[in-house]
């Protein structure tokens, strides 16, 4: 099955549809995006150029099955299509975050969250007598201070 994102005039994803691969075959029997777009236009009354093929197995510019990643991320409703870089982008998580093209992901302006210490990770892995976690150390982005805050959700 092939997947296509239906986009609007602002490149926002409105829906994602599956298409039988046989409906994408050109005259030579080769699967072609443009043939799929024409099929979708005919059967969904939406312009062909506003159907963009997406890969169910691509996330963060990695192919889950070891294949070649396709268009950065599998499109989802509310995602945005960026034609210049050929990437589907999820919603920007924070106003200050920037696009990281290589990983097709959003990054904080100061980089990734720090790594937990060995002690913090061991505390996260520890369970009480009832088998429940006693700690949940992790970093959360603080948009106001533009820094990563270390928090413990279980106290």
Image (spheres, grey):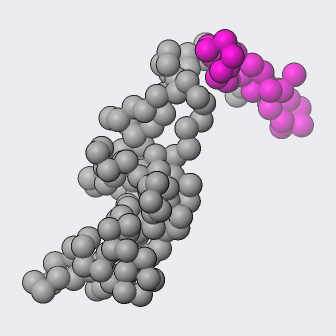
Residue 80, above or below 15? above
> Which residue occupies 66% across, 12% down?
145
Residue 118: % across, % down: 61, 14
Depth order, front residue of 59/142: 142
User: Magenta stretch containing residue 147, yes or no?
Assistant: yes
> Which residue occupies 62% across, 13% down?
147
Left or right of 8? Residue 149 is right
Depth order, front residue of 47/85: 47
Quarter of the rendering occupied by the N terminus: bottom left
Residue 115, above or below 153? above
Quarter of the rendering occupied by the C terminus: top right
Depth order, front residue of 67/107: 107
The span shown in magenta is 127-155
Q: Quadrant of residue 3?
A: bottom left
Residue 116: % across, % down: 61, 17
Q: Is residue 139 visible?
A: no
> Which residue occupies 30% across, 44% down?
85
Q: How many marks?
A: 0
Depth order, front residue of 118/59: 59
Residue 140, above or below 42? above
Left or right of 73? Residue 67 is left
User: Magenta stretch containing residue 102, yes or no?
Assistant: no
Q: Is residue 22 visible?
A: yes
Residue 35: % across, % down: 25, 78
């Amino acid at each position: 099955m092939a997947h296509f994102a239906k986009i609007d005039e602002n490149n926002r994803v409105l829906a994602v549809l599956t298409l039988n691969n046989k409906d994408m075959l050109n005259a030579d029997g080769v699967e072609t995006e443009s043939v799929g777009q024409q099929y979708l236009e005919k059967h969904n009354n939406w312009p062909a150029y506003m159907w963009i093929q997406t890969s169910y197995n691509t996330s963060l510019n990695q192919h889950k099955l070891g294949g070649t990643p396709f268009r950065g991320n599998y499109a989802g409703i509310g995602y945005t299509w960026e034609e210049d870089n050929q990437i589907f982008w999820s919603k920007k998580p924070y106003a200050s975050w920037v696009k990281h093209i290589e990983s097709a992901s959003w990054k904080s302006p100061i980089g990734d969250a720090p790594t937990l210490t060995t002690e913090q990770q061991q505390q996260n892995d520890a369970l009480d007598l009832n088998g429940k976690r006693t700690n949940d150390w992790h970093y959360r982005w603080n948009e106001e201070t533009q820094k990563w805050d270390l928090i413990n959700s279980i106290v």
